[in-house]
Image (cartoon, rainbow, N blue to C red):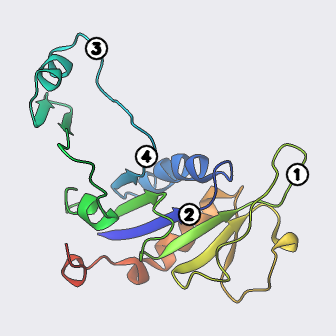
Amino acid sequence: MRVVGFAGYSGSGKTTLVEQLIPALKLRGLRVSVVKHAHHKFDIDQPGKDTWRHREAGAFEVIAASSQRLALMREFEQPAELSVHHLIAHLYTGVDWVLVEGFKSSDLLKIEVWRAPTQGYSGMPARYPDDDFVVAIATDAPQSLPEPTLRPVLDLNDVDAVADYLVQNQDRFEYNADYYQL
């Protein structure tokens, strides 16, 4: 499996890029999984449903499965900060690509999503000058990058170009789970 992170500040376009990359990679015959970092308490379950009731009753884990879907919910008894590598370890190993959104401080190779300030977006500092794990920058304003870079600069609005970059450099993103200590 190959793993690439997408890092950037809120509002930069990470989710939109990942959302568009999924079908672009699937059209190339590739199977894609996604790992998303959630900052706040979130819930995928619905009040009143059986799985919600089981979880509310105190189950540590609830797994629901059908012929088309599987969902695992785990309640941590104490707050737990899992690394991105812990989450990747739970994924099916037969996928071609794992797109990781968030985890901007991780040691994964990543594409930074960066936008210049506009009327609707105040802009944020770039991470690539200080993050050796940023291997490319996806932006809609390459002329406005705060510092020159030798890293590839990808057009944020050309999802096929980003997908092509990933496929052409796929060996670089090969994930070796044995390398990471869990």
Q: Which residue is mark 3?
A: 47
127 or 81, which lies in front? 81
Pointers 2 and 3 in contact (C-beta within 8 Å) = no
Q: Is residue 121 left or right of residue 181?
A: right
* Amino acid type, residue under disc 2 in the picture: Ala
Q: Is residue 105 above or below residue 176?
A: above
3 or 67, which lies in front? 3
Q: Residue furthest bottom?
A: 150
- Label 2 residue SS: strand
Chain-order first, disc 3 or disc 1 = 3
Where is residue 108, by image quadrant? bottom left
Q: Is residue 179 left or right of residue 16?
A: left
- Label 3 residue SS: loop
Q: Which residue is mark 2?
A: 7
Chain-order first, disc 2 or disc 1 = 2
Q: Distance between the Cα atoms at labels 2 and 1?
A: 19 Å
* Amino acid type, residue under disc 4 in the picture: Ala
* Amino acid type, residue under disc 3 in the picture: Pro
* Amino acid type, residue under disc 1 in the picture: Thr
Q: Distance between the Cα atoms at labels 2 and 3?
A: 33 Å
